[in-house]
Image (cartoon, coloured by chain):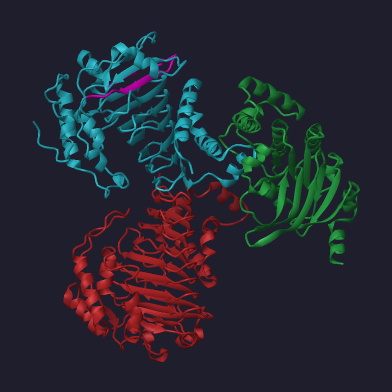
Chain colours: A green, B cyan, C red
Amino acid sequence: MLSVKGLRANVGEKEILKGLDLEVGRGEIHAIMGPNGSGKSTFAHVLSGRDGYQVTGGSVDFEGRDLLAMAPEERAHAGIFLAFQYPVELPGVNNTYFLKAALNAIRKARGEPELDAVSFLRLMKERLKVLHLDDSLLKRPVNFGFSGGEKKRNEIFQMALLEPRLSILDETDSGLDIDALRIVADGVNTLRSPERSMIVVTHYQRLLDYIEPDFVHVLAMGRIVRSGGKELALELEEKGYGWIAGEEAA
Amino acid sequence: MSAELGNGFDRWLAGAEGSSRPRLDWLETQRAQARERVRDQGIPSNKQEAWRYTSLTRLLEQEFVPAAARVPEVGPEVIQRLSIPGLDANRVVLVNGRFAADLSDLRDLPAGVRIGGLRQILESDPDALRERLNGVAGDAQPLFTALNTAGVDDGLVLLLPRGVHLPRPIEVVHLAVATDSPRVAQPRHVVALEEGAQATLIERYLSAGDSLYCTNSVLELSLGRDSVLKHQRIQTESPSAFHIAGVFLSQGSGSRYEGINLGLGGSWARTELRVLFAGEQAECDLKGLYLAGDRQLMDFHLDVEHRVPRCTSRENFKGILYGKGRAIFDGRVLVSRDAQKTDAAMSNKNLILSEGAEVDTKPQLEINADDVKCSHGTTVGQIEPEMLFYLRSRGISAPLARRMLCLGFAGEILDALTPETLREQVAEQVGRRLEQSPLT
Amino acid sequence: MSPSPTVEAVVKSEYEHGFVTEIESDTLPPGLNEDVVRTISARKGEPDFMLEYRLKALGHWRTMKTPRWAHVHYPEIDFQAISYYSAPKTKDGPMSLDEIDPVLRETYNKLGIPIEEQMALSGIAVDAVFDSVSIATTFRETLAKAGVIFCSISEALRDYPELVRQHLGSVVPHTDNFYAALNAAVFSDGTFVYVPKGTRCPMELSTYFRINARNTGQFERTLIVAEAGSYVSYLEGCTAPQRDENQLHAAVVELIAMEDAQIKYSTVQNWYPGDAEGRGGIYNFVTKRGDCRGARSKISWTQVETGSAITWKYPSCLLRGDDSVGEFYSVAVTKGRQQADTGTKMIHLGRNTRSTIVSKGISAGRGQQTYRGLVRIAARAEGARNHTQCDSLLIGDRCGAHTFPYIEVKNPSARMEHEATTSKIGEDQLFYCRSRGLTEEDAVSMIVNGFCKEVFNELPMEFAVEAQKLLSISLEGAVG
């Protein structure tokens, strides 16, 4: 589904990703772990097409298409979804209006008919329940004045609504208390299907207690330095990132 | 015949002396004095603060003649077509500045409410207006207000007696229809709320086509003690039109004024708002939104004078500039020495979206009392790239995302419009305007 | 409301530097005409081009009217009643230190200005200007070794005429405004600084200006040229004796920063402000402008304005070079009947130019203060940025604080933010400090210092201390 080969990317003059390789198959959940500054968020942003990152080498193939050549909205149409670490507030932009515009843009791109107001509302209410989100959220501007937890839940809610093929969760656990974390994880788990893949970017093992990955990769110094099953996450938790860094140096 | 004005505006007043308008000594005196004032002011140049950023050249190139005294023929279907669906309101229609009784709908108004054409009331009961006309605008009138006074002839009069609450908004439709030669209309509106009265006023400046004309309207608003007025001005004149408006507001103690000004139409539009607090503990909330697109000029001047203690004023104006649009925001808050406990805040935010657009903003504070809380803030910027990215990452195309963010920016002002049907209609209009224009 | 006793006390607080130096001086009789200009030029032995320049300026000045747009009020100035040249009667021009008249030396000692090198604050070179002429410049040799020229402008005209000719009037032309034209015609002295390519000036440079003679105007001219990649920090201080009549000070300062050059210009202005009734005091009408001519150049103005009856000045930056930076940090205090109309202009012409404006105004007694500023972002100034913060603090109910910003934006990638606040000194803050044992005066001084901190931080260390002290003295007992 996703094939990343030798990906190199800069932020300004500085090289952050230094030849990253990753293969994600259909229905798989991959966790990417790593210390601060290892390039985790850069990787997530490069996949979603954010400005300010210069790809200097390598390739990203998504279902036979060159992902790096696509505009952010084209990537969304193709089925990529980034759950932001810091979802941006959009004052004045109504949440319902926003969600409808997004969903219909994606449906249109997929050749599906646009939803009318009634079926859209029905769909929304149904997905809201799954995430224990309140209706009132729909009347407010996007993320505006939301608490940290609400913002993260809103991201997962959007994911539930837009039904992407590949979701990238960028430090979705950061800033969440245990209850909020469980709700978010439940939401993610209900979306698991053999058709959908996920990349879960996280610093801590904690999230992986709730969202069980098929593969765990350790990102350090801009490259995947170690890959394994979910037991790798536990090992990391126990020994810390210094263990990997030490081995690298050795 | 008085001497030439020497600034090209004689034509605006031509024939006024000979017209059929009511002759009242006090009114003739006011007209003559205003004429003097017009002459004394000459042609404003950019050396004058109020005209620093606004050029009159385009206006002076036009050869407007006064609108005919007769109300032009307009069928009710025209009004129907321009109406806001589902708006439950009493309606006053003025065509080319003339009060059109036939097109107005003044049913079921509470007893004692006086509403009608200025000319009509000057004829039937001039004393009702003697203290009111120029009562708020005063003597030291700026150029276009003085011109309006010099030619004063018709307009709207609304007088609410003590304690009356209007059950429905009053919608004032200022309709412009094409004439043989470009005309200038100078309507004068007088609105007064006595103690404890409450009303909602919706003014809409509309045109039946895209003809060239000029509106130079003056509105005098007088709010008695503890009265409440919600006033929404929606300017959607024809794309060729010149629009000049003077709004003069005097607020009695404990009164509350909520004003929303939308500058959307016209080719050259200037609005001068002057607020004077006459009594303590009054509140004035002025909101505004302007869209200046291709070669449009949107020029707002706000002058809020705190001359008594304990009043509150808020100004929040937002602008979106694109194409070769140009906007001017000139806001001034004056706090006199006695106006202790004044609370005043002014904000002007602008989105500048294309090359060739320009915004000049001048938020001024003049403070002569110490126990006050005054602030102003101004920004000029663009759509935040991270916001744009967020929307695009959800599959929304860049042009739609930009439009959504512009509407979001405008939302703070648009959301204040009531009732809902008006808000929706105006929001849609703003959306359409943005859709037609390339937002880079 | 009647003024509180403490407000009375502010009004009475005395001007420290109000003494007069009894010294014989060579002063031209009052009046301004071509002969006066010729005499000034001749006494200074100037090259011909300078005389021509002065006469051209005088001609232009005669066609101009006094500017009236500022928010200040004063009676018409009789420009024929002013003497345009006054020099202490000693040998011409700056001299070696042991030659200085002991009376003058004493004057500067009284002011705490170290013109004697052994007493100098470590590493600060001083140029002292007394009435119309420069009397001493210290540390010249050390500076010369680094290639830095630091001398009076009269000397510069004699020793480096081509350098002066090339730059003088290139930032503030003689046609710029009424007072700039007047200055160009009659300026008598001032300071010239030239920092060669790639040189970091080894010490702070400073000039102290003193007006002494009666009925004299002081018209100094400062020109600082920083060549590519150089750096210089310059400070000026000003005092004058206490006299009943007003005296005119109309200076022009021009700064030129080439590629990658930086100029930091700081002012502590403490001219005599006049007495409580508004008698006397200096009219401080000054034109200061910096030209960021080269890419990545930076000009930073910092001013602490506590003196003068009337202050009218707008230190400005022309941001012509791409990526150039302009800064303006200002603290202004008006009390008694002082009036100040001050601010800055940031003209963004180059790409990615940035400017910062921080203005702190304190108004007490019957003081009137105006911030007036212009931020202009030209159509070609791609990516330009400005941030402006103007805060006013009011102490007493007879003073005024006004803010008149002008913002003109013609580029769609420009970002500009302007914020302004006006408020009374916080009673709860005062109470908090006093409940911790501070006297009311100390509390005011502490709060005001906190209010001004952002600006003081920009001053060179030694002067930050001095500025804080000056502020405390200015505000002695000022509680509303």
- Quarter residue A153 falls in: top right
Q: Is residue B45 above or below residue B236?
A: below
Q: Residue at x 56, y 38 (%)?
A: B401
In front of the other: B336 or B97: B97
Location of the N terminus of chain B by quadrant is: top left
Q: Is residue C14 above or below residue B75?
A: below
- Quarter residue A7 falls in: bottom right
In front of the other: B162 or B182: B182
Residue C65 spot, x, y in % from top left = 22, 60
Q: Is residue B354 left or right of residue A182?
A: left
Q: Is residue C174 above or below residue C26?
A: above
Q: Is residue A158 left or right of residue C186?
A: right
Q: Is residue B22 magenta?
A: no
Inspect this view and state whether residue B224 appears: no
Inspect this view and state whether residue C407 appears: yes
Q: Magenta residues, as a range?
A: B155-179
Residue A80 spot, x, y in % from top left = 70, 40
Q: Is residue B169 magenta?
A: yes
Residue B199 spot, x, y in % from top left = 42, 20
Q: Is residue B257 left or right of residue A140?
A: left
In front of the other: B200 or C247: B200
